[in-house]
Image (cartoon, rainbow, N blue to C red):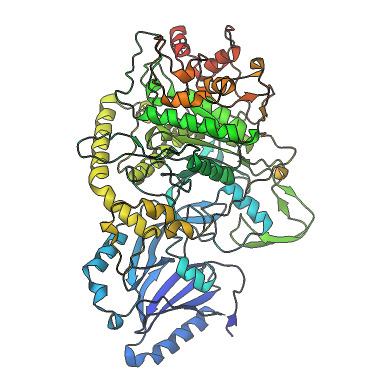
């Protein structure tokens, strides 16, 4: 006999769509062929979406019998016909009159996490819900057809992925914590990384569950099986692109009034020991546009349009909202790595010459961003102050002896010391019977008293995040994120017991595999936001490619990006606004393509008003006392002798807060001819400018211990020489070391 109710927790994975003149019948089953359900969609009301879920859980035989009865009852009007096979509902959308249903018609598995399959879309279908006999002439109008074409231009087969049983929109750390707390079985579509949240809103509200739909995450997913001396592990790289303030390069810049930034992408790097189930680690970093009100207008005459600061925000409210959002999502501290150009180059060697910007473009943003961070740090409590690092990527990369990855690796080491990373801990047995949702098996599990396993012993949590940006948050940012990923990978492999030292050789095959993954991710994100693959000079050089070939490829990428930004980005932005629900066609209102601007849509549009993201903040109490990763605390002392790294920005804040405004308004040219920006005049540095404040001298944790540093001659600030020894390869000669030592970096 058929049974009402859910029949337990399960997910529907295979679908068949049947139709009569009055109804669509969507039949679905779970992967084990134990639960069969029927969903009915009304086809008689063009303007209304009427969906009914049959409360009965069928067997295969019972479901076939039910369909047979439907076919017999509709013989007079044409009977029951199979329309298509599918693997889930992407959502429903209405333009002017009719509703449309989007289905995943083909899928492919691209990986798995903790035993949960992850899929990409190979093919999707857009089906009109109302029967042709009830449609009016509006359904065939040019406006309706144009909306359909616009929606279809969103290619779901590129860089969209989903899972039926794993919350891909959440980090591994959050999923692990919620698994132990018995989280809701419904998929959290209100998350900022679920791109079909608007499309699924109607069906989810009517049914009260999420079993019929798939939650699409947009960005990049790549997984590889690697081995170190026969020890096999999986390495997964996930990029999650935010649906808030989403768009294309020149049409979405900076921040909006709600603190949402353009090109906000969360990157997660996961290591899972394939020989010991449940032993895993992850680290998360973030990229996003500079959180100020600024813009660039695409021009057919100029491939590099002027940067315009659109609004004066004296208290930096939107910037504050953005960093508060990051703090809610990741905890503290928030570490900012700013890679944009500085206006003045400090020269010590005649052979090292880089021209500053002829017109103030990036340097204008650099000054204003530093001013904003300084202002916010005055009003934030000490434990929540932002840590700011400015480093001119382009200036340093043009030096013949520069080792960009080594410098960025030093930044990554400091950031990892502060934030830590997630490590599941080693399994241990507990003599207790319990039942909980299983993160590792894909359903619910009941463990007996002899095999009950916990993964809390030695567990560490990540608190805080490294936020990296350049102008586009594409090319330079991707190199920096790889450097961070490489530094983190060493610690991850060491924590799960695969390696004996918390470091990966930059020239190893493991590092090369990771570089390929980050390069693929960078290309995918650059195509989505910028219109071409990412510009790269660092990665090809590491691979030993011929420089002339690389230069020609970069030139072609520039042409492609220019064409996309100038001629096709407008339509791409319209399609995105329609798909995400920021624009909904209404009778008597202008069409989407007739709008002068879409800015107000992303400030007051429905797509951002639908939900409020729920964020699970890691509690310090959850971290075991035996944790090997600790979060460094900031000292409150002003004694310069206790500083490990001193910054010009720290000095400015000690002198007077009013000087911050001077930094924003003064010219970067030093009247004394010292080639030093006003905000770097107080202290000459030999390392990147750090706003880590003061840190106590303490022994590093075992997991994050670095290689012994070569002893150098002591200077006025001995820790500066230690930093130089860290970033310089041991085979560099004395002259190269002196050249790097002569460079000055400033906020």
Q: Residue 675, percent across and down?
A: 40, 13
The answer to whether 75 appears left or right of 235 in the picture is left
The answer to whether 331 appears left or right of 480 in the picture is right
Q: Can the viewer see residue 506? A: no
Q: Residue 524, percent across and down?
A: 37, 44
Residue located 27% across and 43% down the image:
565
The answer to whether 142 appears left or right of 670 in the picture is left
Q: Is residue 287 above or below residue 391?
A: below
Residue located 55% across and 79% down the image:
55
Quarter of the image where one finds residue 706: top right
Q: Can the viewer see residue 330? A: yes
Q: Nearer the viewer, residue 331 or 188?
A: 331
Q: Residue 293, percent across and down?
A: 41, 40
Q: Residue furthest left?
A: 301
Q: Nearer the viewer, residue 513 or 658?
A: 658
Residue located 46% across and 23% down the image:
662
Q: Nearer the viewer, residue 476 or 501?
A: 476
């Amino acid at each position: 006999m058929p049974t009402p109710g859910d029949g337990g927790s399960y997910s529907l994975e295979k679908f068949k769509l049947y139709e009569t003149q009055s109804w669509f019948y969507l039949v679905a089953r779970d992967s084990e062929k134990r639960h069969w359900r029927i969903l009915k969609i009304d086809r008689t009301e063009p303007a209304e979406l009427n969906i009914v879920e049959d409360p009965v859980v069928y067997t295969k035989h019972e479901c076939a019998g039910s369909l047979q009865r439907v076919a017999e009852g509709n013989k007079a009007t044409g009977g029951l016909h199979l329309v298509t096979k599918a693997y889930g509902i992407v959502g429903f959308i209405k333009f002017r009159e009719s509703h449309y249903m989007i289905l995943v018609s083909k899928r492919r598995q691209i990986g798995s996490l903790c035993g949960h399959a992850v899929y990409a879309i190979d093919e999707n279908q857009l089906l009109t819900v109302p029967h042709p006999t009830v449609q009016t002439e509006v359904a065939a109008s040019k406006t309706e057809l144009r909306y359909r074409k616009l929606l279809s231009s969103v290619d779901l087969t590129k860089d969209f992925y989903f899972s039926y049983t794993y919350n891909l929109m959440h980090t591994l750390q959050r999923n692990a914590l919620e698994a132990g707390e018995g989280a809701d079985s419904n998929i959290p579509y209100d998350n900022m990384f679920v791109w079909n949240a608007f499309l699924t809103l109607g069906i989810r509200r009517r049914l009260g569950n999420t079993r019929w739909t798939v939650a699409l995450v947009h960005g990049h997913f790549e997984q590889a099986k690697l081995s170190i001396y026969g020890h096999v592990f999986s390495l997964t790289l996930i990029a999650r692109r935010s649906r808030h303030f989403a768009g294309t390069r020149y049409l979405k810049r900076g921040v909006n009034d709600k603190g949402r930034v353009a090109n906000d992408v969360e990157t997660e790097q996961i290591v899972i020991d394939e020989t010991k189930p449940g032993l895993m680690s992850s680290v998360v970093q973030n990229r996003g546009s500079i959180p100020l009100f600024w813009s660039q207008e695409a021009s057919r005459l100029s491939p590099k349009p002027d940067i315009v600061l659109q609004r004066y925000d004296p208290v930096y409210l939107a910037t504050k909202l953005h960093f508060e959002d990051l703090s809610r999502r990741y905890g503290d501290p928030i570490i900012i790595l700013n890679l944009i150009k500085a206006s003045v180059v400090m020269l010590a060697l005649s052979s090292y010459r880089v021209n500053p910007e002829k017109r103030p473009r990036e340097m204008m943003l650099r000054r204003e961003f530093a001013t904003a961070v300084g202002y916010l740090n005055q009003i934030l409590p000490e434990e929540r102050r932002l840590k700011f690092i400015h480093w001119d990527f382009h200036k340093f990369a043009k030096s013949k002896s520069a080792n960009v990855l080594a410098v960025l690796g030093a930044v990554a080491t400091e950031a990892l010391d502060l934030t830590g990373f997630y490590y599941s801990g080693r399994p241990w047995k507990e003599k207790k019977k319990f039942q909980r949702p299983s993160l590792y098996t894909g359903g619910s599990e009941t463990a007996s008293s002899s095999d009950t396993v916990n993964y809390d012993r030695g567990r560490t949590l990540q608190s805080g995040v490294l936020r990296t940006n350049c102008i586009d948050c594409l090319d330079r940012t991707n190199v920096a994120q790889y450097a961070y990923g490489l530094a983190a990978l060493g610690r991850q492999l060491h924590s799960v017991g695969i390696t004996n030292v918390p470091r990966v050789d930059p020239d190893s095959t493991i590092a090369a595999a990771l570089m390929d993954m980050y390069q693929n991710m960078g290309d995918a994100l650059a195509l989505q936001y910028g219109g071409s693959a990412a510009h790269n000079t660092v990665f090809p050089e590491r691979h030993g490619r011929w420089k002339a070939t690389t230069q020609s490829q970069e030139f072609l990428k520039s042409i492609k990006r220019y064409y996309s930004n100038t001629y096709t980005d407008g339509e791409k932005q319209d399609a995105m606004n329609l798909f995400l629900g920021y624009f909904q066609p209404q009778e008597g209102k202008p069409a989407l393509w007739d709008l002068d601007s879409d800015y107000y849509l992303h400030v007051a549009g429905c797509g951002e008003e639908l939900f409020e993201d729920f964020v699970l903040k890691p509690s310090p109490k959850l971290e075991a006392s035996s944790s090997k990763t600790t979060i460094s605390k900031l000292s409150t002392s002003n004694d310069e002798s206790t500083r490990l790294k001193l910054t010009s920005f720290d000095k400015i804040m000690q002198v007077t807060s009013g000087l911050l405004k001077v930094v924003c308004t003064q010219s970067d040219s030093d009247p004394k001819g010292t080639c030093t920006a006003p905000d770097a005049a107080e202290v000459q540095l030999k390392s990147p400018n750090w706003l880590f404040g003061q840190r106590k001298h303490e022994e590093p944790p075992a997991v994050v211990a670095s290689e012994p540093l070569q002893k150098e001659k002591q200077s006025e600030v001995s820790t500066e020489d230690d930093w130089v020894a860290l970033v310089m390869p041991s085979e560099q000669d004395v002259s190269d070391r002196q050249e790097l030592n002569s460079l000055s970096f400033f906020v």
